[in-house]
Image: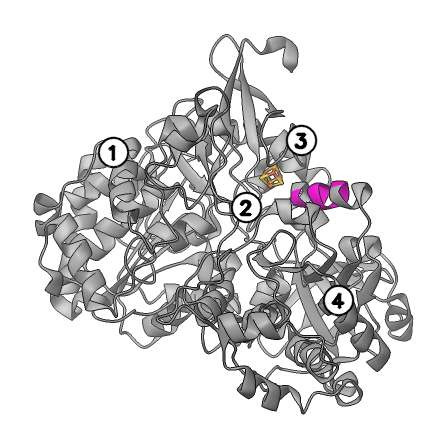
């Protein structure tokens, strides 16, 4: 492919949250024909994973939408092509008809972690400032909501305090429910590189023998859903043996007495019986972590997708706080985010509040944003509305009549899809906005809006370590598809407040507004010193990066700037008194657990070749070759007991539904567990339960009870 490339253009990968810088190679006709990692980018240093290597193929992948489509009755009528003006006029009037008939909140919006940050900001302006429904959320409720909630409860604000560079300084690392080689391959490579230079213990907590577990010094195959018990027991040992950092606790935290009282009940002997990790291992890990000098924890969906995901995040934060491991090199609590811009939506989309980590509950935040946008602050609700996982039940009860889905595909991604199917059928008006017209949920839609994909448009992503990087447009949108930014600002014109609020014409204009809104002495999320050009030159900048910081960097013009790698380096947190919260977390077992009728745990996760519901990767031959179909990992002893052969087909059955999958017998899973990749339609989420975390409303995708039947 290199031979055909006449120009390389800089951009940022649009799949996972690692945030790799990519050069896209264009041929003489301007077609994207190759990619390569950007050598001087700090994140990936010239490397890409298999998804990045074939990312240029997605521009021409089958199934792209070309024209807006409309129809009266889903399934019964064929879609008819229309022009953008007609489509947006109709959409604007349908939203207002529904709101005028059933109330403002009867129209709901669910977006994604895939848009560019400027698009999130603009959608937030439209949703909060023009449409005015409080039922606006993102699909990040399915992946990162527990991390957000846990950070807020511990530190008073969202925002991961650490960075990849911490791998180069840590003396002990625990990975909780995180399988980097498949989920975030380039972060894994950074970790491996750090370990090759300097040995430190890598401890993996995961019920399955994942690729990362195979690489670890210690693998703790925990009983699903019991991570709080292990965390409490680690803190029990640390406090009982006097290994805590008392100076840090006294100076920078509050609530230690409550935590001490709670963890007393979790001595290693008692904990071992619940979480399945032997008592000596618990003691050893506690001592390793507390005595390391600099210790860090990372986690992904193994913690977040749980009935107590938010508590799990708080537990990790508390473990780090009591050992003085926040805000120092190698000592941190780092949530490894899922989607390329899950961070951007948390920061600027207004899904759970207002832009720039502001919340609806604070009158001063409502006032600030209303004044900046030039609207009446009474237009804003005074508290957060429904999350994605609560919007669907509200459709069932008739409270919500209209829904707009932006780059998200609940017919594959939500738990218990049989119920979601029935729910979508109840809607008066469903709009799908996506780059691909053939996403499964479009089957239920009244309207489809074709969006430009990834580097057909321009704006920023924020990665796992708070690094803002730029997605440069490298090619034109296909057919009559439009950047999401354009769709949002044009739809805004159909609402009365759309005449009052200024919507910038370019993503750079939106970025300038965000800079204004981010300024402030005490704000961590301050981007006022950045610009699109400086971000590209720097290959990404970590926030906060304040106005005036640029001038302090001598070689900024040649080499760009780095920003700030860590939060809370001064031990001052975003709580009213500046102290971090230590919160007791008693364990309550509220999972659906295996029994005689459904004797296996079902676990789910990613494979390296695919991303989310495969709307993109499922179209790319080079990725599908490696991972064409769903499969189920099953322990060989359990398979033999049921007379099931390797590579035979079985039916996996839960109380919600069933799916047929091919068996791969492997020792990766224990005898009482099966594992299925979550990407495939009509598969794992026909079976999953999705009980919700009470704080984050995130579903427990990874834990439910199933039985296996031969077919
Ligand atoms: Fe893209 Fe993530 Fe792969 Fe990097 S690791 S190339 S960001 S999918």
Mark earlier in primary sequence (2, 1): 2
- Dot 2: what SS? loop
Mark earlier in primary sequence (2, 3): 2
Q: Is residue 601 above or below residue 164?
A: below
Q: Which mark is residue 509?
A: 1
**Mark 2 crowd level (few <14, some 14–19, many ≥20, 10 Å Cα):** many
Identify the residue shown where x is 54% and y is 87%: 258
Gap between marks 4 and 2 measured at Cα: 31 Å
On the question of residue 361 being in view, the answer is: yes
Mark earlier in primary sequence (3, 1): 3
On the question of residue 629 being in view, the answer is: no
Q: Which mark is residue 17?
A: 2
Q: Is residue 95 left or right of residue 8?
A: left
**CB of mark 3 near ligand 1 (< 8 Å):** yes
Q: How is the image coloured?
A: one colour
Q: Is residue 217 left or right of residue 511?
A: right
Q: Is residue 375 left or right of residue 405?
A: left
Q: Is residue 283 above or below residue 597?
A: above
Check disc 3 and report the residue beneath it: 47
Q: Which mark is residue 291?
A: 4
Identify the residue shown where x is 67% and y is 78%: 235
Q: Quadrant of ligand 1?
A: top right
- Dot 4: what SS? helix
**Picture coordinates of residue 676, whole percent (x, y):** 70, 60
Instruction: Please say whether residue 189 is one of the residues in the magenta stretch.
Output: yes
Q: Is residue 629 above or below residue 9?
A: below
Magenta stretch, residue numbers: 187-193
**Picture coordinates of residue 75, whole percent (x, y):** 38, 54
**Mark 1 crowd level (few <14, some 14–19, many ≥20, 10 Å Cα):** few
């Amino acid at each position: 492919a290199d031979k055909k490339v006449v120009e390389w253009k800089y951009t940022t990968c649009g799949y996972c949250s690692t945030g790799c810088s990519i050069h896209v190679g264009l041929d003489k006709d301007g077609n994207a024909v190759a990619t390569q990692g950007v050598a001087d980018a700090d994140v990936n240093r010239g490397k890409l994973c298999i998804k990045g290597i074939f990312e240029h193929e997605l521009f021409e992948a089958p199934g792209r939408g070309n024209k807006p489509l409309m129809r009266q009755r889903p399934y019964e009528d064929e879609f008819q092509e229309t022009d953008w003006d007609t489509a947006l006029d109709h959409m604007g009037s349908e939203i207002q008809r529904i709101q005028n008939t059933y109330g403002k909140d009867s129209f709901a919006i669910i977006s994604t972690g895939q848009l560019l940050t400027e698009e999130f900001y603009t959608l937030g302006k439209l949703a909060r400032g023009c449409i005015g429904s409080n039922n606006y959320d993102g699909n990040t409720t399915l992946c990162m909501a527990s991390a957000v909630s846990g950070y807020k409860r511990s530190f008073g604000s969202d925002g991961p305090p650490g960075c990849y560079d911490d791998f180069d300084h840590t003396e002990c690392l625990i990975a909780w429910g995180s399988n980097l080689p498949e989920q975030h391959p380039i972060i894994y490579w950074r970790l491996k590189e750090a370990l090759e230079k300097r040995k430190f213990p890598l401890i993996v907590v995961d019920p399955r023998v994942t690729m990362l577990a195979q690489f670890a010094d210690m693998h703790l195959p925990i009983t699903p859903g019991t991570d709080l018990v292990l965390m409490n027991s680690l803190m029990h040992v640390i406090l009982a043996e006097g290994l805590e950092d008392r100076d840090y606790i006294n100076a920078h935290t509050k609530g230690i007495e409550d935590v001490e009282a709670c963890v007393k009940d979790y001595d290693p002997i008692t904990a071992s019986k619940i979480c399945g990790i032997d008592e000596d291992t618990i003691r050893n890990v506690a001592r390793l972590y507390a005595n390391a000098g600099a210790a860090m924890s990372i986690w992904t969906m193994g913690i977040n997708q749980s009935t107590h995901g938010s508590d799990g995040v708080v537990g990790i934060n508390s473990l780090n706080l009591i050992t003085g491991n926040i805000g120092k090199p190698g000592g941190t609590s780092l949530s490894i985010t899922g989607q390329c811009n899950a961070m951007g939506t948390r920061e600027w989309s207004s899904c759970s509040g207002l832009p720039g980590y502001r919340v609806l509950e604070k009158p001063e935040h409502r006032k600030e944003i209303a004044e900046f946008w030039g609207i009446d602050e009474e237009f804003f609700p005074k508290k957060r509305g429904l999350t994605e996982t609560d919007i669907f039940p509200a459709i069932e009860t008739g409270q919500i009549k209209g829904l707009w889905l932006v780059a998200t595909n609940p017919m594959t991604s939500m738990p218990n899809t049989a119920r979601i199917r029935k729910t979508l059928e109840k809607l008066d008006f469903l709009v799908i906005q996506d780059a691909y017209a053939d996403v499964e949920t479009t089957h239920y839609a009244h309207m489809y809006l074709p969006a430009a994909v990834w580097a057909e448009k321009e704006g920023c992503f924020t990665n796992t370590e708070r690094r803002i990087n730029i997605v440069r447009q490298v090619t034109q949108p296909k057919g009559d598809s439009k950047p999401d930014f354009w769709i949002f600002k044009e739809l805004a014109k159909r609402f009365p407040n759309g005449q009052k609020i200024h919507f910038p014409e370019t993503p750079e204009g939106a970025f300038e507004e965000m800079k204004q809104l981010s300024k402030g002495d005490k704000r961590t999320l301050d981007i006022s010193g950045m610009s699109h050009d400086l971000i590209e030159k720097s290959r990404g900048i970590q926030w906060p990066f304040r106005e005036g910081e640029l001038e302090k960097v001598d070689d900024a013009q040649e080499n760009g700037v780095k920003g700030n790698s860590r939060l809370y380096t001064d031990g001052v947190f975003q709580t009213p008194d500046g102290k971090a919260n230590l919160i007791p977390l008693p364990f309550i077992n509220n999972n659906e657990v295996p029994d005689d009728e459904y004797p296996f745990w079902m676990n789910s996760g990613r494979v390296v070749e695919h991303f989310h519901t495969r709307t993109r990767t499922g179209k790319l031959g080079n990725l599908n070759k490696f991972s064409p179909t769903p499969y189920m990992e099953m322990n060989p002893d359990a398979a033999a007991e049921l007379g099931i052969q390797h590579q035979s087909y079985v039916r996996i059955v839960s109380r919600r539904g069933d799916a047929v999958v091919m068996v791969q017998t492997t020792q990766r899973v224990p005898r009482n567990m099966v594992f299925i990749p979550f990407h495939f339609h009509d598969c794992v989420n026909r079976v999953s339960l999705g009980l919700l975390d009470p704080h984050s409303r995130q579903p427990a995708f990874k834990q439910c009870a199933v039985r296996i039947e031969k077919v």
